[in-house]
Amino acid sequence: MERFSKFGGVVVFLAVLSLEQGGALGVWEQAHATFYGGSDAAGTMGGACGYGNLYTDGYGIKTAALSTALFSNGKSCGACYQIVCDSKKVPQWVGCKRSGGIRFTINGRDYFELVLISNVGGAGDISRVWIKGSRTNTWEAMSRNWGSNWQTLTYLNGQSLSFRIQTSDGRTRTAYDVASSNWRFGQTFSTNVHF
């Protein structure tokens, strides 16, 4: 994709490796991806996954916008794809490599926590998320709102927050006390937890 970064707005028709659950080797599928915004990826910032600034969220400019079929209503946000222009090449899965730990940006208001989860390595795409406040006894499942934004309708203000994440390959990680009890909406918290 670096070769295409010189040409803003280039649509690339190519073969994309489709991965099965569990990280098994998949099959090549014809697909297309788009790279926007010149060599600095300015036109790709934001996007349908909600990451915002691709540099600060750990993704950089080696990023492409997927077709509707591959995007899968946001379920593919954060996933890594091997992209080639020759479908005769042997498919090989390579995990997403991220620097640092998983990041959580908490937005919303009172009974609505909207959490953007970024910098997820390994499979990269998140299949399930749970949240637990320091005054609750159980892990509560969150639902995908859009892209890589997950929501809960539970009042968790004034509690430290822990998160449990499962990626599409079934691996699960838990980040305890990510946000202290004095967290505020709009803050981003980095962890030492990674896949």
Image (cartoon, rainbow, N blue to C red):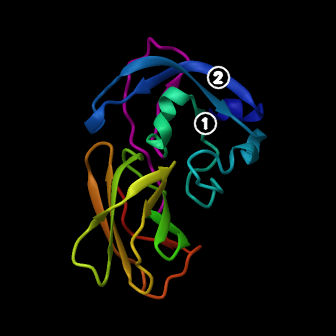
At horizontal 44% and vertical 49% (from top left) the residue drawn is 97
Tell me which label, 2 or 1, sits earlier in the chain: 2
Q: Position of residue 146 (x, y in %)?
A: 51, 49
Q: Image point 47% across, 69% down: which residue? A: 113
Quadrant of the image for the N terminus? top right
The type of residue carrying mark 2 is Val
- Left or right: 13, with 127 as reference point: right
Q: Is residue 166 above or below residue 21?
A: below
Q: Work out how far the residue at label 2 is from the one at label 1, CA to CA, in angstroms.
A: 10 Å
Residue 90 position by quadrant: top left
Q: Few, some or many C-alpha atoms within 10 Å of disc 1 (few <14, some 14-19, many ≥20)?
A: some
Q: Secondary structure at mark 1?
A: loop
| Residue at figure coordinates x 60%, y 41% from the top left | 62
Q: Amino acid at mark 1?
A: Ala
Determine which residue is flagged by label 1: 64
Which numbered tag is attached to residue 12?
2
**124 left or right of 11 in image:** left
Magenta stretch bounds: 78-100
Give the percent coordinates (x, y) of residue 8: 77, 34
Q: How many marks?
A: 2
Picture layout, residue 74 above or below residue 50: above
Q: Are marks 2 and 1 in contact (CB under 8 Å)?
A: yes
Q: Nearer the viewer, residue 138 or 96?
A: 138
Residue extending furthest left?
A: 137
- Mark 2 lies on a secondary structure that is strand
